[in-house]
């Protein structure tokens, strides 16, 4: 393993310490207001046919809250598209569907849309007749460059050695030295309905030696809450063996995942250029409720090969009793290949290296653990999941480890 401190971040920790010191004696110091943007192009008329374009100057790269005031003439569904006219022909939905049931005024609040600094051409879309009165963007959290990269040796024959791990032997919230929470409900690129909370132990906690990520039914504003943990902003990895020992839920609509995402990710336009490795990916509608038998999906997504253009390279492997029994979902990633394993059985290889668009895996990736609901892959959520007395929908992770060998 090699340690790399990013040269541009030397002094970063010191600055953070100074900020912390300033705020601790803060009877005089004030927390600076986070940037926000009131978009001047509004109001915008929507007639159910043609979306209107507008321009937003995003001040800093980070996650934003979008506040939209809308006056509708009747039922309809509205959403905001980013990167109009992008050259790769893709559609970037940064709000998910905003549904109006009847005529009247509505205020929508969407948290967490990741946006890069700079000028964005956006478009309002609507399936109904309405006037969008105003749109405001408020920075929730500035993007944090990951300060530490661990590079693993994959060359030798020695036994595997753990270089980084979370065994989840603590209690309460996940270890804040290892994880940050992605927050919000912007749809996560897949029109997923869950709100990912930040620092709520109901959705993510350590307990009895495991991490529990729990999706919970909520209210009309937040029909589901859950959690998505990432090592981004703390530590990321270049090569290595990654092991996730976990149980996943079988309820229809659940979508459990343990995966990596490239450090280059800033917002949806930087995906899948940044690369993604899906090590554990299981959806409830493919798991038998009685036996718990189902399948795991192993995939890599790159700009050359990814699911939205239908050519991603993916394999499935049957898994017994996924809900009741722990299984080890693993990845071995070196300079030439990404290989995936289920309980030690090799079932997947990605070795496309012809172009940088096919092989972003020479750059660091961070780890993510999450439980989504619905969306493109999770599918329709079983109403029984939110019924009174329904069993909790949980991903249970015994450990996640990164290993190398000399
Ligand atoms: Ca454990």
Image (tube, grey):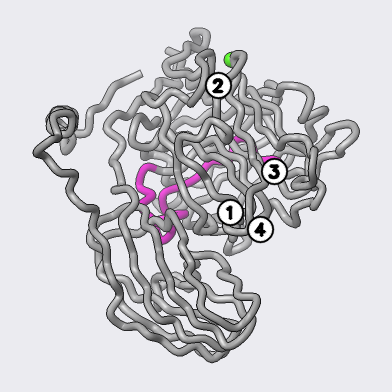
Using the image, determine if residue 71 lies above or below residue 296.
Answer: below
> How far apart, in angstroms, are the residues tagged by discs 3 and 4?
18 Å
**Please, what secondary structure does the residue beneath circle 4 have?**
helix
Residue at 35% in and 47% down: 264
Asked whether the beta carbons under mark 2 and mark 4 sit within 8 Å of each other, the answer is: no
Numbered badge on residue 315: 3
- Is residue 24 shown in magenta? no
Counting from the top left corner in percent of width and height, residue 317 is at 75, 36
Q: Which stretch appears magenta?
A: 263-282
Counting from the top left corner in percent of width and height, residue 8 is at 16, 38
Residue holding disc 4: 376
**Please, what secondary structure does the residue beneath circle 1 have?**
loop
Mark in the foreground, 3 or 1: 1
Mark in the foreground, 3 or 4: 4
Q: Quadrant of residue 203?
A: top right
**Please, what secondary structure does the residue beneath circle 2 have?**
strand
Looking at the image, the residue that sits furthest to the top is 158
Mark in the foreground, 3 or 2: 2
Residue at 54% in and 91% down: 47
**Please, what secondary structure does the residue beneath circle 3 have?**
strand
């Amino acid at each position: 393993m090699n340690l790399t401190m990013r040269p541009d971040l030397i002094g970063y920790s010191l600055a953070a310490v100074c900020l912390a010191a300033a705020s601790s004696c803060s009877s005089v110091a004030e927390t600076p207001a986070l940037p926000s943007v009131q978009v001047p192009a509004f109001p915008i008329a929507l007639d159910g046919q043609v979306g209107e374009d507008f321009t937003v100057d995003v001040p800093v790269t980070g996650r934003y809250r979008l506040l939209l005031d809308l006056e509708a003439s009747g039922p309809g569904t509205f959403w905001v598209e980013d990167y109009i006219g992008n050259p790769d022909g893709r559609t970037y939905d940064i709000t998910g569907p905003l549904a109006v049931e009847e005529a009247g005024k509505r205020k929508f609040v969407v948290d967490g849309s990741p946006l890069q600094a700079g000028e964005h051409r956006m478009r309002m879309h609507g399936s109904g007749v309405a006037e969008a009165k105003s749109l405001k963007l408020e920075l929730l959290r500035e993007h944090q460059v990951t300060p530490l990269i661990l590079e693993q040796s994959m060359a030798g024959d020695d036994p595997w050695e753990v270089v980084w791990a979370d065994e989840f032997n603590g209690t309460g919230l996940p270890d804040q030295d290892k994880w940050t929470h992605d927050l919000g409900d912007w749809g996560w690129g897949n029109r997923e309905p869950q709100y990912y909370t930040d620092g709520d132990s109901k959705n993510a906690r350590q307990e009895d030696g495991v991490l529990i990520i729990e999706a919970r039914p909520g209210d009309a504003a937040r029909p589901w809450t859950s959690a998505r943990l990432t090592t981004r902003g703390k530590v990321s990895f270049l090569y290595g063996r990654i092991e996730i020992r976990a149980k996943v839920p079988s309820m229809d609509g659940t979508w459990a995942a343990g995966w990596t995402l490239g450090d280059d990710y800033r917002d949806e336009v930087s995906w899948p250029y940044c690369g993604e490795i899906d090590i554990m990916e299981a959806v409830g509608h493919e798991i038998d409720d009685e036996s718990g038998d189902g399948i795991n999906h192993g995939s890599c997504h790159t700009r050359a090969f990814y699911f939205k253009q239908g050519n991603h390279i993916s394999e499935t492997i049957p898994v017994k009793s996924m809900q009741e029994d722990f299984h080890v979902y693993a990845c071995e990633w070196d300079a030439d290949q990404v290989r995936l394993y289920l309980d030690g059985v090799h079932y997947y290889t990605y070795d496309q290296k012809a172009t940088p668009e096919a092989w972003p895996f020479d750059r660091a990736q961070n780890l993510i653990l999450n439980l989504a609901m619905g969306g493109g892959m999770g599918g329709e959520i079983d109403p029984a999941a939110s019924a009174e007395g329904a069993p909790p929908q949980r991903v249970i992770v015994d450990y996640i480890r990164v290993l190398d060998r000399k």
